[in-house]
Amino acid sequence: METLVVLPLLTRPECLGIPNERIRSKEGISARDIGKGNKQKIGYIPDYCVYLQSLPVLIVEAKKPHRDVHVAYGEARLYATEINRSFPHNLNPCSRIISTDGTHLLAGYWDAEPEVSVSVAALNPATPAMDQLIKIAGREQLARVIEPISVALRAKDFRRPFNQGAGQAQIISRLEPNTFAADLSPVLRRYFSSRDQTTDPEIYSKAYVSSNEVSSYDRILEFFLKDRLSRARRRTELTTTRRKSDKITKAISTFGEAKPIGGDLQLVTGSVGVGKSLFARRYKEFLQPKQMEEKNHWAFLDFVNAPDDLTKWNEWVCEQFTESIVEEGAPFDLRDGDDQERIFAKDLADRSSYYKRMEKIQVDRGELERARDLEQWRTDHSRLALGIARYLQGDRGENLIVVFDNVDKLDVNTQLAAFQTALWFMDQTRCLVVLQMRDSTFEAYKDRPPLDTYKSGQIFHISPPRFVDVVRKRLELCLDSLSEHAPEQVKFQTRSGITISYPSTRAGEFLKGIYIELFQKPNNVSRILEALAGRNVRNALDMFMAIITSGHMPEDVIASVAQGSGFQAFPEYRILRALMRQDYRYFNNYSGFVANIFNCDSKWARPSNLIIPEILFYVLRKRKDKGDNGQVGFMAVARLVFEMEALGFVEEDVRDAATFCLKKGLIEVETSSPDTIRAHDSLKATASAWAHMRILSSRVEYIASVMPTTPINDKQLAARVFEGMQLENRFGQLHIHQQRQLAESFLGYLTKQQKEMMAHPGFASRESSGTEYVLEKIREALRFARNEESQSNILADKLDI
């Protein structure tokens, strides 16, 4: 009956015209106790509820045939009454009622008897009965009803506390870097900068973390940061040692022996920043066996520099190939005439009869035509690329390997375009193309064109090394270099004006001490660093450098830790401050490596500081479930929107908040786009989301630091936050009790927001919510700040389960 009568009536354009996604069945509707006395029903749930702008507006009760449709109408009215009771006075969103037994239908308003009483058989389009029903419960009518209620429920006057007085200039002001590492800066930046890592021979020869050197994560981070390979394909982990990588060697050897007519393609997948480019360069320079070096000729094409116009890619690839193959030491000189003739031998042979005719007409005319042709071909990138490939692989019988480098940094559509270009180039040149692609892109599109053409191919996968292992390797390299490049005496000045000097021979001890404190002692700092860096090695290096050089990390604190005297540990708040603010005086949305999970936008339909915690809590709790796209932890955007709307958040706000989370690295989408979520995408939580919710939200330093940039609709609280900014500007930092007071005020502010959200039936009925979770984390932060005993280490955390 519901399929034949109710849903067509609700959804068909000629009927009520309500979109399917706005209709919730029993599974998505909150239960209510209705009626009194003997007629009371416990946990009543209607059959359908229509939601617009996340508010319940129409209740539909469908009974079996010949059941009392008036009783059903009464039950639906009672349910609507219970729902409206939760909302403020005179705001009654749940205002329309429909009941039917499949043969008869009643419709009307929540606080009155039915306006429509009609046989279902008589409800045909364009009939008076249908017109009357549409006037009561049609899509446009429901939208008009709900719009003023949604506006009335909108919290107003959200403003960022810094946005007054001198705050605008202060929030973007910067601190000078600390002077502790100033003399060591050239050496440190060489080994801990994320730039130019694949072009420095010392980095890719000595600082590469081989597979057998990767240490293990703790239980939680293991799930987020260790790749899980698909079993559906011939997908192989690309393992390495310090001396060799047998699997890639076997693949190249097989190519060299088979010499396939159409060339070959080898996919190498992994997340962005995991080190695919570094591996390719390291293999070419150090890992390929000696007997293969002379037979293998390499070219590296950096697709970061590819033209935006995809129609120009074929020409660009050929041009870059001819430049790179020479730079990589190919056995010819393009300026040498004899080598030109070797490269274009086939072309010259094809035109030999023409040259002979020209020679008969005029002496030396044939040679002149040859010279003209050679010059024309030499400047034709496509022809030159084909000639080089034919010469190396045909005449010399050697191997040509072309790496399509940094393809993984492109958006998903451009990655797929690069795959098609790779197929074209390997077909033209008969070479082995090594194409780097993001693992998430491959998993999402492996069964669709053009990737479905690679069904029988073997996929190599590179898993990311751990933050701790990368820093350790760079540190080892750095220590060897310090004695040679650092000045004999290293000096720095503390904030109190005291100058400290130590011999460069001790610089290594200082850096070792910092490393041990950050990574080798069991504490939450190392977990935060690992989680924030995620699987991106570049982020890991930048974070380590930020901690050492940040002006929020005083020189005397670093020195005392490095020397193993004074402080026996870095104050955690110092590290958090450096990570959050980097070289800015205050935290802002562009500083450091940390995001503000209480962010919202005053332009949203219904702004809320709780929407991001709810999104993150939900996706984190689903991280072990099989996803909507078949990958663990991924959920469709439509599912996320559905769940958040059930809590009272508006679809457009949810999408905007999710996009903010994506840009800040708290979630990732299957396409690996850094800033765009499409309606049909799937997304999942990152380790950084876990660290923000699980650890950072329970730190007063985090709470107090994000408040100046958090949109707040409480003028008194905003004024207190701005006053705190001025105190910090005057004295350099806030005292812990001042931070605690701000955090206490913020807790009260968010608790009030939580109470307002409780008016929504879906929010009120949710057993476990991100709001309650994060509020408890702030309470935990306050207990710690007051030196009170915390139960967090005793009780199992919901996000660790």
Image (tube, rainbow, N blue to C red):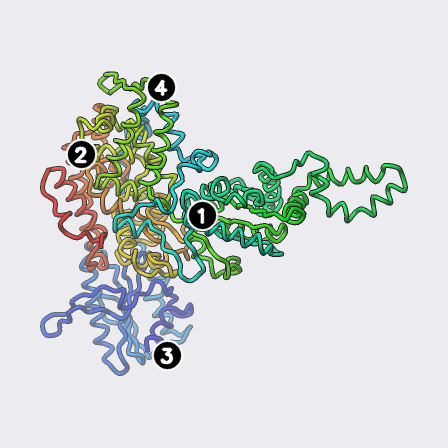
Q: What residue type is labelled 3?
A: Ala
> Disc 4 vs disc 1: Cβ atoms closer than 8 Å?
no
Alpha-carbon span between mark 3 and mark 4: 95 Å
Q: Is residue 14 above or below residue 276?
A: below
How far, Cα to Cα, is label 4 from label 1? 39 Å
Three-letter code, disc 1: Ser
Residue 148 image point, x, y percent: 30, 53
Image quadrant containing the N terminus? bottom left
Residue denoted by label 1? 245
* Mark with earlier residue (4, 1): 1
The tag earlier along the polypeptide, 2 or 3, is 3
CA gap between label 2 and label 3 equals 68 Å
- Few, some or many residues within 10 Å of mark 3 (<14, 14–19, 20+): few
Location of residue 659 with respect to 104 vertically, above or below: above
> Mark 3 or mark 4, which has the lower sequence index?
3
Q: Residue furthest front?
A: 291
**In this rendering, would 293 be left or right of 134?**
right
Pointers 2 and 4 in contact (C-beta within 8 Å): no
Mark 2 vs mark 1: give the one in front.
1
